[in-house]
Image: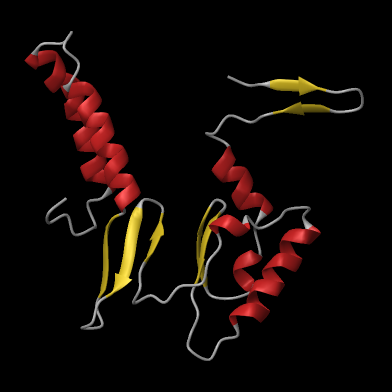
Amino acid sequence: MDETRESKDLKVRSVPTLFSPTLANIALNGIENIHNSVRYADDMVIILKPNDDAQAILKQIVKFLDELGLQIKWQKTRLVSATDGFDFLGWHFKVQANGKFRCVPSEDNYQTFRRKVKRIVNCSNDGATAKATKLAPLVRGWRNYHRYCKLDGS
């Protein structure tokens, strides 16, 4: 499902999403040397300690990306305390008052899952067996993805 667009001087071909994480990992190789971080493809969490200068680290990241011709998406970039929690790759991470780190499915991920389930359940054209057949892999996949999260109440 490649899409090719051409202009007078340039031919651009979009890459299937299967290869996008690999290409992002190749392009961003070395960014983890700037500061402690966790990265999957182009999604990244920088882990700061209380005395770290967040703005200086951000400037280094901007410079690194600029050298590659890339830019930060500022609308998706924010500085948060781990005690306030943050979403990353479909999970919500938070340090609890007792000091333990907790992860649960993110609200957006959970709502997307619920919409998919509702779409199947509310389909009046399917019988109970057909609905169960469609729901089983969806529920199994969601539970497997979040198997390391606390799923109480999810």
Find residue 49 and report its horizontal and vertical position in percent: 48, 85
| Towards the viewer: 26 or 137 | 137
Q: Residue furthest right?
A: 9
Which image quarter: residue 34? bottom right
Q: Residue furthest left?
A: 128
| 45 to the left or right of 116 | right
**In the image, is residue 9 above or below residue 73?**
above
- Name the residue located 92 percent from the left edge and 27 percent from the top edge: 9
Q: Residue furthest bottom?
A: 51
- Name the residue located 66 percent from the left edge and 64 percent from the top edge: 30
Find residue 1 and report its horizontal and vertical position in percent: 58, 19
- Name the residue located 25 percent from the left edge and 41 percent from the top edge: 142
Which image quarter: residue 91? bottom left
- Name the residue located 35 percent from the left edge and 73 percent from the top edge: 84
| 72 to the left or right of 9 | left
**In the image, is residue 125 above or below residue 21?**
above
Find residue 10 and report its horizontal and vertical position in percent: 86, 28
**In the image, is residue 104 above or below residue 136?**
below
Find residue 11 and report its horizontal and vertical position in percent: 82, 25
Which image quarter: residue 131? top left
